[in-house]
Amino acid sequence: MKTLTIRALLFGMALAVAAALVPPTASAASPNLFASVAGNGTLVNGNGFSSVTHIGTGQYEVTFTSDVSSCAYVSTTHNAFSQALQSFTAGGHLSSSGVYVEVKNQGGGLTDGPFDLAVACNMTGWDFAVVGYTANLVRSSPGATLNHLGVGRYHVNFTAGVGGCAYLATVGDPGNALVFNPNGVYTGSGSAADSVYIETKNPGGGLSDGIPFHLAVVCPNAASTKVLVVRDTGLARRGSPLTSSFNRSTGNYVFVTNLSLTACTMIGTRGSVDTSVPFSPATVEITPGPAPNTSGIQVRQLLFFGGGLTNQAFHAAGIC
């Protein structure tokens, strides 16, 4: 295990050196809609955006230059406090071009905190689904279907294979209401090549119905995007070319690619690398990477289980 970790580290370092010769990714030509937002509501970077409104403590609206009401919204917080924060999404409260985001501590209290946000629409390399409170498919990529397998368990089925992709999921209202209760959503491979397995859980880790979620399936052929599905050891299970990862300490991972990520957004969510159940729920947050072509990803237990750093598998995408 130590040998594998050292090899992964050396490979990551080699890519970091190589990336110094590669110009930064130019998001101006990208079709992707995303934003990185500081805790005070300042826009750090993004693409296809118009503005950010800091509505109140822990409440934000990111407004894009196009109508995004038919899309899905996935978000990940940046590590900023001793406990991991969580972000929840909904349709815009101010306009149909907006995405409403709430950042909360794990007790449910609204808290100002930095986050990354990506909008999943009908673009090459992307599939999406938004599922409501009654296990109903509210909107999705064309042809997608939903199976409610049991309490807190779902299959989302698409019209083409998604086995090589990353599955990113956020608890979020399907309309533009508030998301009152902090819960979790976790992904894995479905029983068929065109399906994604989803579990929704309460803060104590129990499977629960009535938790709405947004799912973005991001594949290696998505424009200006790098994806990885990472084992708990830090080694990638699948992902984009010239993209790797390694575990530098318990719960701390590094996402490495061949392009600069400084003008990009990072989304990471807890999920299995295969069809196994993502049994242990955890939080995923973004941390600074050691080089411009890297991003840190931190995985922690839920506070209910102590909140400590833990090695668990996750799905991630650098969206530029």
Image (cartoon, helix red, strand yellow):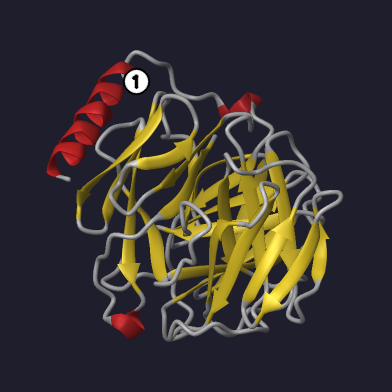
Tell me if residue 292 can be seen.
yes
The quarter in which the C terminus is drawn is top right
User: How many badges with numbers are in the image?
Assistant: 1
Q: Residue shown at 42%/65% (left/top)?
A: 113
Asked whether, in this view, residue 259 is left or right of residue 61, the answer is left
Residues 283 and 66: in front is 283
x and y, in percent, of residue 149 in the image: 69, 74
Tell me if 209 is positioned left or right of 26 in this view.
right
Q: Residue at coordinates 46% horizontally, 58% vertically from top-left?
A: 272
Decide if residue 187 is on the left or right side of residue 314.
Answer: right
Q: Residues within 10 Å of mark 1 (few under 14, many from 20)?
A: many
Quadrant in which residue 66 is drawn: top right
Foreground of the two, 139 or 88: 139
Place of residue 223 in the rendered image (x, y in percent of width and height, measured from the top left): 63, 29
The outermost residue toward the right is 143
* Quarter of the rendering occupied by the N terminus: top left
User: Is residue 145 positioned above or below 150 on the image?
Assistant: above
| For residue 20, above or below residue 107 | above
Name the one closer to the observer, 157 or 35.
157
Residue 167: x, y in percent?
Answer: 57, 52
Q: Residue under label 1, please give it.
A: 19
Element carrying mark 1: helix
Q: Nearer the viewer, residue 194 or 269?
A: 194
Q: Position of residue 179 (x, y in %)?
A: 63, 79
